[in-house]
Amino acid sequence: MNFNRAVIKVGSALVAPAKNGCSGKYILAIAQFITKCHQQDKEVILVSSGGVAAGRSVIRHGSPELSVSMKKAMSSVGQMKMMANWQRFFDIPCSQILITQDDLEDRERYISIKDTIQIQLENGILPIVNENDTVTTEDLKVGDNDNLSALVAQACEADCLFILSDIDGVFTKDPNIHDDAILIPKIDEITDEIYAMAA
């Protein structure tokens, strides 16, 4: 593992694969990887999705189409469940850092986030970052945790970013629709052709 500080982004599909509460099915292996990193004196910042999926079973909704307010309520309760689920796999303390686009654009808040994470890393704490869904509006929303993890990696001067999901990688076509879709094992440069494959 050729890095000193990494940001690892974990998607909702890994935190709550059934979309109805947290699970250790996938995150146990991720936690073991993070533990190995710590044993080699490598620093890790975790960006974890899953608040809405973790809180889905707690908030009565009665519809597959959720309103924004319903998602915010689910995220608020689900964030606690998600944090407890992560913490159970670690002997070191974890911290919760909830941020918005506005926090990253404001210089003073940006520095505050950076300094907070730096101090936590120096003290052997695993920072777990997520977007603060309860207070975000369309104007303040980062967009998704892929974008958030890239911004956090930049703020924390990480030299590596892992984006984990239940998708095997970039395909030439959508593999859920096209049987002839081919996985591209390595991308050295983002060309217009590669960019056009993204969906």
Image: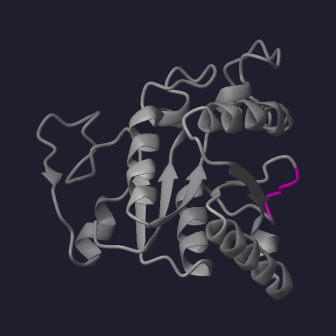
Q: Residue at x 74, y 28 (%)?
A: 66
Q: Residue at x 44, y 66 (%)?
A: 41
Out of 18 and 64, give the one closest to the viewer: 18
Using the rendered view, name the quadrant where residue 105 is placed: bottom right
Using the rendered view, name the quadrant where residue 176 is placed: top left
Q: Residue at x 42, y 78 (%)?
A: 159
- Direction bottom: furthest residue: 107
Give coordinates of residue 79: x percent, y percent: 75, 38
Q: Is residue 25 above or below residue 119?
A: above
The residue range painted magenta reads 135-139
State left or right for residue 150 relative to residue 142: left
Out of 85 and 42, give the one closest to the viewer: 42
Give coordinates of residue 132: x percent, y percent: 79, 53
Q: Is residue 12 above or below residue 60?
A: below
Q: Residue at x 38, y 48 (%)?
A: 33
Out of 37 and 139, give the one closest to the viewer: 37
Using the rendered view, name the quadrant where residue 32 is placed: top left
Dominant SS type (magenta): loop
Residue 18 lies within the magenta run: no
Give coordinates of residue 126: x percent, y percent: 61, 55
Out of 7 and 188, give the one closest to the viewer: 7
Tell me the quadrant of the picture where the N terminus can be found: bottom left
Give coordinates of residue 147: x percent, y percent: 56, 65
Q: Is residue 4 above or below residue 35?
A: below
